[in-house]
Amino acid sequence: MNFDFSEEQTLLKDSVAKFIQNEYSYEARQKNSQSDAGYSEKNWSTFAELGWLCVPFTEEQGGIGGGPVEMMIMMEEFGKGLVVEPYFSSVVLSGGLLAKAGNESQQAELITGIIDGSKKIAFAYNESQARFDLHNVVTQAEKNAQGYVINGNKSLVLHGASADLLIVSVRTSGESLDNDGITLLLVPVNTEGVSIKATRTLDGQRAAEVQFTNVQVNSDALLGEEGSAASVIDRVANEAMLALCAEAVGSMEKLYKDTVAYTKERKQFGVAISGFQALQHRMVDMFTAHEQCKSLLLRAVLSYSAGDEGAVKNIAALKYQVGISGQAVAHEAVQIHGGMGMTDEMSIGMYLKRINMINTLFGNADYHLQRFTELSL
């Protein structure tokens, strides 16, 4: 099987890698993370100018028709730089929902806004009782003459406080665990009754707790078909997991390479610690864990792109292995660097925190091990 990138894919990879190397130092990342917005508006404008925000959208939608492979390429490089801009939340998640469920008018307005950088959209799907079940929705939307009235709460809405618009999963019929009856609604953040409380996440990024109290939206706020959003959410979740795992693989590569470089400089007893056989074995284990996850990532991305029946099972296996191996690589890097590896002055500890965050998004390793087992029966 040919794993070589096309000329266009290589140019995309080089473009992102060059930006991360030259413009996205760890110090700059930390400064942007600690700003009010939690990221750099200048960088976001640069993403738009370089055409990165249009990658996953079709040519009819104003994009370049990129697929899971192009997303993998970008997210791997973002993982190496610990990128804090809302690419995942606005482009991968929200853009994915709009591309799959939006009507012509919604796509023309909102996808165009995402591509030119003028609109940031967040997907409010998570609820405190749901654990990792995307179909466990109790936030209610009652239909009336004007449209819908929303009541409920959403937690861990990624970059929710900096978004212009929320895509909210609500229940319009059925019980809390039913697949049927889930609907997607577009809710501007300045709508009366929407309360947003911003929080800083473990990895220095931003999320929000969102409360909806008698929030009235018009009927044109409906995204897709009423009561039939579960299948669309599942498809976007699978693509989101591929993107997150690609980001984690990029972080793992950076961790083991930085650790090897550190051991060549750090000396004990007058010699570089890279010569200690025990540490060499541990660094080989880090390299092997990264390569294993990289292979699983390629398998999952290619099977999903081809529409294989086993693609979802491959994604579950990938998410499990990234959860296990990602933390193992990060912990080894911290231990080899010593106590300073966990300080904010070094990036090593932040990679560990980001990998831990990725592990929890859309289901942790234990959840996907069980999911893989069920899919194998």
Image (cartoon, rainbow, N blue to C red):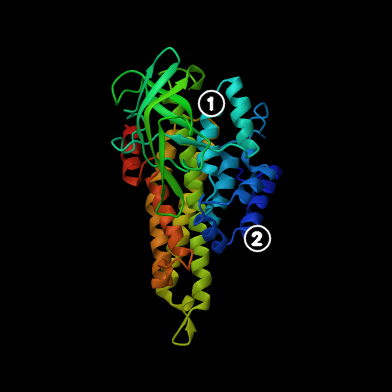
Q: How many marks?
A: 2
Q: Position of residue 21 (x, y in %)?
A: 63, 60
- Report the side of 118 relative to 89 (left or right): right
In the depicted structure, whether residue 375 falls above or below residue 144: below
Mark 1 lies on a secondary structure that is helix
Q: Where does label 1 land, which residue?
A: 100
Residue 55 in view in this figure: no
Q: Nearer the viewer, residue 346 or 187?
A: 187
| x and y percentages locating residue 306 in the rendered image | 55, 32
In front: 235, or 283? 235
Image quarter of the N terminus: top right
| The one of 8 and 231 positioned closer to us in this rendering | 231
Residue drawn at (47%, 30%), measured in percent from left and top?
Answer: 191
* 347 sits to left or right of 331: right
| Residue 23 position (above or below residue 67) | below
CB of mark 2 within 8 Å of CB of mark 1?
no
CA–CA distance in space, label 2 to label 1: 35 Å
Q: Which residue is mark 2?
A: 22
